[in-house]
């Protein structure tokens, strides 16, 4: 890892991002993870990219044609951010105490989020210490039309 004291690391850390909860299910298992490296990358078809550490359990579920939900957090929803920040062990109930809905594929929509996007993995590429998942947006809904997204900047661009 580069030296975190280099000047450009502070600039890199201040590249703003939104905060999202990516939810997915596989067989009888389900989970969610906090994601911040998300960006729209195509108009036609509508696509977005999500950076995921390959060693995360959910990463193995994000294969081509797999479905997931990207739940956009709004200002004032740091409680949802904190709920998902540490991740979950297999068998731990990730959505306990939260208001949720289910998609046709069984993926979880967080009803209290600012909004959500239903996505299907189109491709995946290694990108350093993360994989870049490219997904097609199939649908979604803005739950709170007047809400503003929760944004995040870091002090240093070389660590979370």
Image (spheres, rainbow, N blue to C red):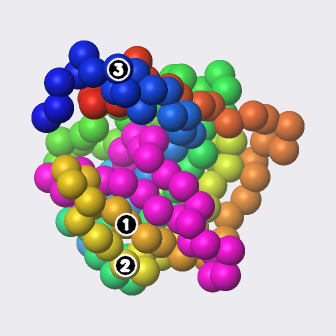
Labelled pair 2, 1 in contact (Cβ < 8 Å): yes
Image quadrant of residue 136?
bottom right
Nearer the observer: mark 3 or 1; the answer is 3
Residue 102: quarter of image: bottom right
Q: Report the disc number at residue 133.
A: 1
* Local crowd size for mark 1, using a 10 Å CA cut-off: few (<14), some (14–19), many (≥20): many
Dot 2, how many residues are within 10 Å of its Cα: few (below 14), some (14-19), or many (20+)? some
Element carrying mark 3: helix
Q: Earlier in the sequence, mark 2 or mark 3?
A: 3
Q: Which mark is residue 7?
A: 3
- Determine whether 16 is above or below 117 in the image: above
Q: Quadrant of the N terminus?
A: top left
Give the label on residue 123, or none.
Answer: 2
Residue for point 28% across, 31% down: 158
Q: CA distance from mark 2 to mark 1?
A: 6 Å
80 horizontally vs 93: left or right:
right
Q: Nearer the viewer, mark 2 or mark 3?
A: 3
Cα distance in 3D space between marks 2 and 3: 34 Å
Q: Quadrant of residue 30?
A: bottom left
Dot 2 or dot 1: first in sequence order is 2
- Give 58 or 37, whichever is nearer the viewer: 37
Q: Is residue 43 magenta?
A: yes
| Magenta stretch, residue numbers | 32-59
Can you give x and y, in whole percent of width and height, for residue 59 in the image? 25, 60
Of residues 9 and 102, the one drawn nearer to the viewer in this rendering: 9
Total numbered badges shown on the rendered structure: 3
Residue beneath the point at 17% across and 24% down? 3
């Amino acid at each position: 890892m580069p030296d975190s004291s280099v000047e450009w690391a502070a600039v890199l850390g201040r590249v703003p991002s939104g905060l999202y909860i990516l939810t997915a299910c596989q067989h009888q298992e389900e989970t969610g993870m906090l994601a911040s490296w998300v960006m729209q990358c195509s108009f036609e078809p509508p696509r977005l990219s999500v950076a995921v550490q390959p060693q995360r359990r959910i990463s193995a579920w994000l294969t081509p044609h797999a479905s997931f939900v990207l739940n956009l957090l709004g200002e004032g929803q740091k409680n949802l951010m904190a709920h998902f920040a540490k991740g979950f062990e297999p068998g731990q109930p990730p959505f306990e105490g939260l208001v949720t809905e289910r998609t046709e594929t069984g993926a979880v929509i967080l009803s209290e989020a600012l909004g959500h996007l239903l996505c299907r993995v189109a491709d995946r590429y290694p990108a350093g210490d993360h994989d870049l998942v490219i997904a097609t947006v199939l649908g979604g809904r803005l739950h709170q039309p007047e809400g503003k997204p929760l944004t995040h900047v870091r002090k240093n661009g070389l660590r979370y």
